[in-house]
């Protein structure tokens, strides 16, 4: 079972991905996809066991006919609201990294059979009309993802995923699709751009056109990544 966790952007993007995945003939029909991301619930909101986010996600799992024990893969995309309050780089990114580590611990506690978390950072925020998460904070949030993955590689105990090295505190952490591109400047790897119409009125949340771009990145990732395609695709599917 594939679950998303995160804030409003994550909810918008993964909700659209979920609808696309349901109609995808290449998706393994045994893979249940559930959107657990919640509007306004930024990274700090997922960091404690008594947060109201967890009962809400539990309700969504029940509505999909699955249980917490069936969650095995997670797409995680978090950010901090108003990150300028947390200081200039690297201060705000370091604080996000701390929240990510706590969110990862909580994810495993609530979903004990999670094997892997794919983490992504934000889309472009250069059109933002308010201080919720503009540039350069949107771009710099990727450093938090990088650092928390590096901490697991380094063997930080609170992110241990290897039972031979002590208590398991986290699933395996890997990069998910990288979503950021520099506005209308085409990304060298695939030509991705974000135009004004790809964002909603606040310049922060993706419009349907912007959501479609994230859906394509997510779909391509799950169909081609070596750790994902083996379970996401039908055995005879050719991405």
Image: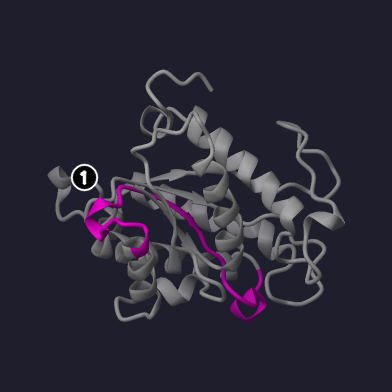
Instruction: Please state which of residues 53 and 58 is positioned toward the viewer in this rendering.
Output: 58
| Residue 35 x/y as whole percent | 47, 58
Q: Residue at x 53, y 23 (%)?
A: 239
**Disc count in the image?**
1
Q: Residue at x 57, y 72 (%)?
A: 80
Q: Is residue 230 left or right of residue 111?
A: right
Q: Which residues are magenta?
A: 63-88
Picture colour scheme: one colour
Q: Is residue 222 left or right of residue 64?
A: right
| Residue 84 x/y as whole percent | 67, 77
Instruction: Please state which of residues 9 and 82 is positioned toward the viewer in this rendering.
Output: 9
| Residue 218 x/y as whole percent | 56, 42
Magenta-colored stretch includes residue 72: yes
| Dot 1 crowding, Cα within 10 Å, few <14, some 14–19, many 20+ | some
SS of the residue under disc 1: loop
Instruction: Please state which of residues 228 and 140 is positioned toward the viewer in this rendering.
Output: 228
Answer above or below: position of 13 versus 59.
Answer: above
Q: Residue at x 30, y 55 (%)?
A: 159
Q: Residue at x 45, y 33 (%)?
A: 27
| Residue 205 x/y as whole percent | 70, 65
Answer above or below: position of 110 versus 182.
Answer: below
Answer above or below: position of 56 versus 78.
Answer: below
Q: Classify residue 30 by image quadrant.
A: top left
Q: Is residue 136 left or right of residue 111?
A: right
Magenta-colored stretch includes residue 198: no
Residue that mark 1 sits on = 162
């Amino acid at each position: 079972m594939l679950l998303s966790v995160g804030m409003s952007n994550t909810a918008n993007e993964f909700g659209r991905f979920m609808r696309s995945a349901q109609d995808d003939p290449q998706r393994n029909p045994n893979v249940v996809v559930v959107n657990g991301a919640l509007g306004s619930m930024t990274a700090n909101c997922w960091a404690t066991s008594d947060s109201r986010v967890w009962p809400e996600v539990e309700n969504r799992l029940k509505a999909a006919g699955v249980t917490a024990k069936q969650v095995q893969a997670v797409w995680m995309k978090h950010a901090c609201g108003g990150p300028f309050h947390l200081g200039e780089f690297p201060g705000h990114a370091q604080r996000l990294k701390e929240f990510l580590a706590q969110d990862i611990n909580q994810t495993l506690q609530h979903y004990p059979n999670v094997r892997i978390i794919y983490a992504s950072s934000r889309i472009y925020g250069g059109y933002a009309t308010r201080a919720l998460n503009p540039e350069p904070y949107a771009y710099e949030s990727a450093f938090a993802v990088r650092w928390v993955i590096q901490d697991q590689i380094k063997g930080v105990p609170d992110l241990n995923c290897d039972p031979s090295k002590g208590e398991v505190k986290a699933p395996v952490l890997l990069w998910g699709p990288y979503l950021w591109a520099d506005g209308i400047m085409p990304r060298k790897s695939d030509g991705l751009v974000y135009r004004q119409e790809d964002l909603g009125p606040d310049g922060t949340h993706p419009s349907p056109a912007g959501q479609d771009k994230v859906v394509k990145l997510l779909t391509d990732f799950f169909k081609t990544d070596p750790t994902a395609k083996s379970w996401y695709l039908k055995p005879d599917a050719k991405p």
